[in-house]
Amino acid sequence: MFTGLDSLSPTELQALRDEALVSKAWPFEEARKVIARYPEGFPADGVIFETGYGPSGLPHIGTFGEVVRTTMVRRAFELLQPGVKTRLIAFSDDMDGMRKVPPHLPNQELLKAALDLPLTVVPDPFGTHDSFGAHNNARLRAFLDSFGFDYEFLSSTDCYRSGRFDATLLKVLAKYEEIMAVMLPTLGAERQATYSPFLPVSPTTGKVLQVPITARDEAAGTISYADPDTGETVTVPVTGGHCKLQWKVDWAMRWVALGVDYEMSGKDLIDSVKLSSQITRILGAKPPEGFNYELFLDGEGAKISKTKGNGLTIEEWLRYAPPESLAFYMFQQPRAAKKLYLGVIPKAMDDYFQFVAAFPGQAPKEQLGNPSFHVHGGPPPAYAPPVTFALLLNLVAVSGASDAGMLGAYLKRYAPQCDPEGDPRLKALIDAAIAFHADHVAPTLKRRAPDAREREALAELELWLQGHADADAEAIQFEVYEIGKRYGFEPLRSWFQALYEILLGSSQGPRMGTFFALYGVDNSRRLIGDALGEVRA
């Protein structure tokens, strides 16, 4: 998916870099925030971008959105600062205790017996990995690899147990009172009575405990608590994986320990970002840059809920469209609420290809604002389908084509230079149009009968087509337009809407001249004839 900047000459690259310094495209605005962190030069080990993942569930469309958007900022930074090393850390919070059993998983009794154990200790209900956490981590990595993301995977469990977090954990212990002063006002009275930033891991049961801390020893690096089963005092180090931090404190600790420079998050975490940023400063570090993106809505404008299942899965999107179109959709206005449902896929795909086609003819300023540049991390691979996906859907609807060969024949006649069988991208579009129509369009179509004026206008259009069998799309479009004016359709778009409703069974549709040329003049005449006779529901 990411093509990079290697295809550019030094002159072209410099022209883009000059424009990137002032570009208003949001990835460049974010990248300039990262640059401003280091007015005296960048660290030797480079700049670190991070995305977080909770492995109690499988990666989803939101996971893709966060990683692809962060990658866009990373690539923008690399254009602005050539030679500065960057890393993207995909961090898994797999040491969290499993507080409830997801109802859709197999082996429910096995999982219920493992409640409160770290996810990397919980048995894998699928029986394929050493733990439930390892299973979902593997799925995450396979997911990211399938899109070609460049990242470094880090496991919370590994970082805690290996000692990588030890120095920062001791800082948390040293700043315990200051951190408590930040956290306690955000909690209810009952939670305040038991809250501690440290969650000890029981030496006897292995569970991640949520218990009050009865004592702490900064010099020894330990905390003490009353065992919930025996009541006996237990003392454990805060280092070496013997404790896990509460997540808001954990987030700050991770930023400090890993030196994170940039991390974005959803709008629902704004307050959490503020708290973790305060704690980061208490620990003597600067919080990372980032922004809060807006969450997606379903087709009715309601908040997407995993429980309700009213969202769109990434598998559904990729069934009908390439990943580049999804990355394009994620690029668009990340701070604005957008609906995420099946109906947005055709337009997202067509808009993506439209921006790809426009890119070569644009000046550097426009190229950097072109979404396809950010989708690919550089100039997009040149490709222009002979027709739009929306037009393919309309063709499937009126032709009844259910196999790629028939649709390919229509395309070949309309655009002889295309290769429906030898071009894998075009073949994928054809297959996707057939599947999308069958799954989601066909059940909604219902053609209506024309009224008296529409009948006369259609009859004239059919007669004109009869005498212009070799007309191209532009000539047909002009005549459709002229007929609408002659019959007094006002506004003129009501004439085109009538054509969509009568001929296609939908309230919206394609450029009719292009559609008639693609479908063929003779076929189009028969389609109009059917409408003037007995209309099919």
Image (cartoon, rainbow, N blue to C red):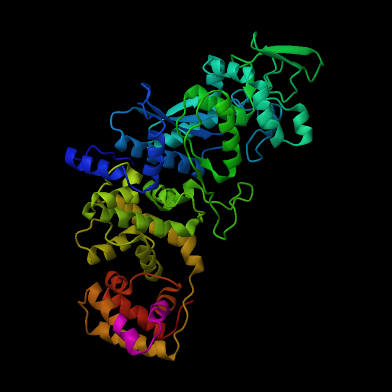
Provide residue 115's location: percent of width, then percent of height. Answer: 70, 28
| Residue plotted at (54% across, 14% down) | 163
Asked if residue 60 can be seen in this view, the reply is no
**Is residue 524 positioned above or below 289 on the image?**
below
Q: Is residue 158 left or right of residue 394?
A: right
**Is residue 121 positioned above or below 71 on the image?**
above
In magenta stretch: residue 495: yes
Comparing 19 with 369, the one in front is 19
| Residue plotted at (47% across, 80% down) | 448
What number of labels is visible?
A: 0
Report which quarter residue 107 is drawn in: top right
**Is residue 458 positioned above or below 210 on the image?**
below
Comparing 130 with 190, the one in front is 190
Report which quarter residue 253 is drawn in: top right
**Is residue 156 positioned above or below 424 on the image?**
above
In magenta stretch: residue 235: no
Name, please, the residue furthest toward the right: 231
Provide residue 332's location: percent of width, then percent of height. Answer: 42, 52
Provide residue 426's location: percent of width, then percent of height. Answer: 30, 54
Specify the quadrant that holds the N terminus.
top left
Report which quarter residue 134 is drawn in: top right
Provide residue 13's location: percent of width, then percent of height. Answer: 22, 40
Comparing 460 with 278, the one in front is 278
Magenta span: predominant SS is helix
Q: What stretch is highlighted in magenta?
A: 481-498
Asked if residue 362 can be seen in this view, the reply is yes
Name, please, the residue furthest toward the front: 40
| Residue plotted at (63% across, 35% down) | 106
